[in-house]
Amino acid sequence: MLLVLLVPLDGGGAQAEDTGDPVRGGEIARRHCARCHVVDNRFGGIGSTPSFRILATVADSEARMRSFFARRPHPSFVRVPGVARWTDLPANATEITITPEQIEDLVAFTRTVAAKAKRN
Ligand code: HEC
């Protein structure tokens, strides 16, 4: 899809500093992402969707997290204040709104998941 190519995947202006709170990030992940992603290896998740443990340990993990709203399948149901809507099509899943600050919290949470994955 051409639109995807025109928008930077660096978080679209989201802050790239280490300002996130991992505890808040975990709460956001459990509330909004666990519908599809396994967050704690305990509950939730859709079979074909990568777990947070995987998301946290892939190459470019933090860059992917900062731009997740621009990566399939999220553009159709994630809104980020200050970032243009991706499509005029109706959402294909319950819409969620995530702020740039919350994205930093998710990045911080992902870092703790990665640290834990390395220990195990
Ligand atoms: C409606 C289901 C759904 C919800 C809700 C959802 N995701 Fe995803 N996510 C997916 C699927 C499916 C994939 C795998 C896409 C693929 O492999 O093409 C994915 C992939 C990802 C990736 C990797 C993208 C890439 O290109 O590497 C990240 C990062 C991610 N999700 C973050 C999140 C975060 C953070 C939340 C919550 C704020 C969230 N997702 C909520 C379905 C969902």
Image (cartoon, grey):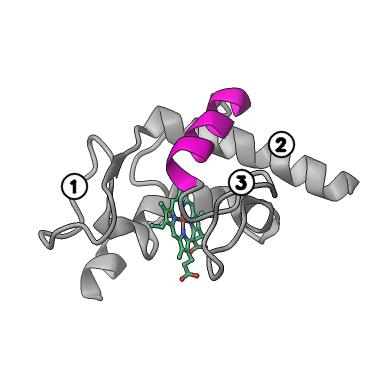
Q: Give the percent coordinates (x, y) of residue 102.
A: 44, 31
Q: Majority secondary structure of the magenta segment?
A: helix
In front of the other: label 1 or label 2? Answer: 2
Q: Give the percent coordinates (x, y) of residue 15.
A: 43, 33
Q: Give the percent coordinates (x, y) of residue 49.
A: 53, 64
| Residue carrying label 1 | 84
Image quadrant in which you'd find residue 79: top left
Query: Can the viewer see residue 26 in this picture?
Result: yes
In front of the other: label 2 or label 3? Answer: 3
State yes or no: Cβ of the residue under disc 1 lies below 8 Å from any atom of ligand 1: no
User: Is disc 1 placed on a helix, strand or loop?
Assistant: loop
Q: What label sits on residue 39 in the rendered view? A: 3
| Residue carrying label 2 | 112
Q: Does the magenta run of residues contain 25?
A: yes
Direction from residue 116 to residue 22 in the image, left or right: left
Q: Which amino acid does the dot numbered 3 rest on?
A: Val
